[in-house]
Image (cartoon, helix red, strand yellow):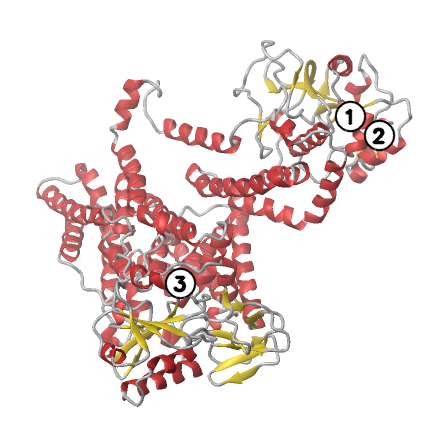
Amino acid sequence: MPETIERLQRQVYGPATIVVVGAGGEGRRAADRERVDWAVSIPSLLNGLEPSVTHLWLVSAGALPRPDALQALVVESERAGAAVAGSKLVRPEDPERLVSVGIATDVFGVPYSGLDPDEIDHGQYDVVRDVAASAGASMLIRRDLACGVGGPDPALAPQAAAIDLCQRARLRGARVVVVPSSEVLFPERATKAEPWREEAGRIRGMLKAYSLLTLLWAIPLAFLIGFLEALVAPFLGRWTLFSWIRAWAWNLLRLPSTIRGRIGARAGKAVGDAELFRFQLRGSAKLKALAEEIGDKLRARLSGEDRLSLLSFGRDLRQPAFIVGASAIVFVLIATRAVWGNGWPVVGFSLPLPESGRAAVGAYAGGWNPAGFGSTSPLLPFIGFAGLVQVALFDSPALTSAVLTVAAFLSGVWGMTRLARTWGIEAVPGMLAGAVLMAGPAARAIAAGTGVSTLLALGVLPWTLRVPLARWPSGWIARLGRIAAAGWVIALLAVLDPPLIVVPAGLLLLWTLLNPREGAVWRAFGVAAAGTGLAIPVLFPWLAAADLEAYLTAGSAYWEPGVVLPWAIMIAVVGILVSAPGLLGELAVWAGLAGVAGAFLARSSDLGLGREIELLGLALVSLGSSLVVAVSLEAVRRVDLVAGWRRLVGGLAALGALAVVVTVALVLIPGRAGLPQDSLSSALGFTAVSEGDPGTSRILLIGPADTLPGTSRQVRGADYRVVSAPLPEMWEARLGEPLLGDDMFEEALEILIDGETRRAGAALAPFGIRWIIVTGETPLEAVFEAQFDLTPLQGANKTSFLVEADDPVRVLTEGGEAWSRDGTGYQGEPAPGERVFVGESASGRWEPGPWVQAGWGNQVAADAGVAYFRPYRSRRTQAVAALGVFAVLALASGWGRRHRP
């Protein structure tokens, strides 16, 4: 600062007074030392200036203006009729190198200098011209304009503050120019603040400057672009997710002050947004920079001095790593293409996400479980996680399922590549192993059993091993960050599929037993165990409220492996043990044991274990087989280390591995990520357009259990399932503990089966049943064919009946008005003084009160036009705490990564 003040005092066109602004006590002490004035802020400075002062020259601490810098600004700005004028910035250590000659921005406020790295000043920019913004290091602004706009926003980072000030000035009709003849020496690094602060400033600047119409499209696009960057940045060696979250959270917390700033910025505007757009770039500067960075990364991996030459590029394209990497991306896109527009197929446990992500989060956090006739049983953590992602993705269920699927596949392939690199296995075997992890025989078995959340968890599984096994950092902050990273990665795995939480520490314990003398291996196990402990709180409130015994023993996903996988893996493991060097042999044994343990668990129904444990076993088989593939193909690459007949055995091991790799092509043709074909949309879709249905009717599905969505119940040995029309959603996949509504419905079915009545419609209408659809061969079909008040529907995809009875809806007022669904609650026309029947299993938590039990259901007041379930406060608190634990672990991980040497 002293040198800056000295340069100001040596100006040819001397300033009337020099004032240090801000910086608290430190700034005041610096002003006293240099014998200049001090002001707490720009507004207070403006209030204390002499009337003769016409301009303010804002100069950043550290800037070194040339003696004629101020004179050039004053003369050229007056000549151009500009109210704001900025200087040309050059490097102090090399004044021929340019730092800034004015700033261009895109509509989102992202700056673009237009300069090449280390660009030399040859006078190519020496002309006064209009710019979107001037660099804040040296900016001349008319006093009257400064009084009108209030000066720079002190809450913003330097660059964002300069852009914001120039935009507010231009809204008032002011001209903003750069004056290249005014030179200021300024270090380039001084213009850079923390990325999240600049991002937060750009968002705040948009909120203050733009019209509401522009904000309606600019803010969502800025959010989406930032989210896209957060997804892509890790592949480029950066981590922007936390900066992105922090920037938006900062703006959310400061929204009231932003609104006040917006009122001031827009109050005296003389022009519209079109004037701002005139000086902005087309498109997104951030996306362009991201594309350039990706291109640079790709070029950096190509060999040859002339990386852009056609000959070199053609030669590099033939490199196996490049081909396999590109093929892996193409494979993922092709293998998941059917999910992009349609979401997950409606079959088994693969059901559409709820229409409202916010409602899904609320239902998980202590709300109502809408499966069947409803219950208070907790929903799985996956529902809450998917709901959060859906809220971030504009509440689109189809987009959310597509993003989750593609992200899981890409993460699985990339994660296996990184995990393989832990042991020196090259990219080609690692990428092929990743393809086997996500689309190999075991993964296809998971998908065929519609284990959607387990399939997504496969994409996280290799990272839960990679993080603990990665090189141990030296600083204690970085080490704490590593443990926190293990915690949030394992927590994400557990949220997607809770039983998998035991896998990382269990597999690393097995690895330590195979390598008992290696301290690094024991440390990795310790990190995984600590991470598992940190991840457990993230499973609340589900973990506290769920019946774990019933969860782990219900259902079946019994695995009947084909011939190829067991023989191919066995040949590969034996071949590696005979032919491969020591570490690869140990890895093969480890992977083989994991696969054997997984195969045992995947066929454990005879031991009383259920679907979830069998899916866990399939996940172990998928991971083990992918590791065997990686080791087998790496052993071939190291063929020079062995000789004679061992080479032949190694070749046989590679053939076994390739046989497994080839099978991943089976997911390409259907493009559903291995999931089975949709079997319910066409059969149930017609219920969405039925006349007279306000959207609260139910469908009774009868048929074999494997043709029904999710879990099912039985009556007299026949399977049935009650779902919401027109299609069941993911939160209905698993039935909760049966309550009064389920018991009374089963009694009604038994009466029909016993032939005590021939009017099934009248018996089922009070339960909201409007349709009965047969999904497969069942003895119940004959029962319903014999009823008087059921109408067979002609032309339906499957045998279907329409209930011919009055008001087969869930929610009905005393005046006979039906209400529609709203998440897990209901809404309709307010009926003052009336009550409304809510066709959900009786629970005293239904509001608004007073609550009265009506048979198997509920009656609440209809005055407000809404009926909702009052969530359990303890569960909601636990859910918020779980999200907080996850956020703390993620932030601590990022903090530790920044302190990694």
Task: Describe the element under mark 3 as helix, strand or loop.
Answer: helix
Q: Which residue is mark 2?
A: 33
Q: Of circles 3 and 2, which is in front?
A: 3
| Residue 60 seen in the current view | yes
Q: Which residue is mark 1?
A: 2
Q: Which quadrant holds the N terminus?
A: top right
Whichever of labels 2 and 1 marks the residue nearer the N terminus, that label is: 1
Q: Amino acid at mark 1?
A: Pro
Question: What crowding class fits label 2: few (fewer than 14 Cα within 10 Å), some (14-19), or many (20 or more)?
Answer: few
| Mark 1 residue element | helix
Mark sitting earlier along the chain (1/3): 1
Q: Position of residue 158 (x, y in %)?
A: 67, 33
Of 753 and 62, nearer the camera is 753
- Amino acid beneath label 3: Met
Q: Quadrant of residue 799?
A: bottom left
Q: Are marks 3 and 2 in contact (CB under 8 Å)?
A: no
Q: Nearer the viewer, mark 1 or mark 3?
A: 3
Q: Residue at x 71, y 45 (%)?
A: 259
The dot on residue 730 is 3
Tell me the distance, in whole angstroms, between the alpha carbons under discs 2 and 1.
Answer: 9 Å
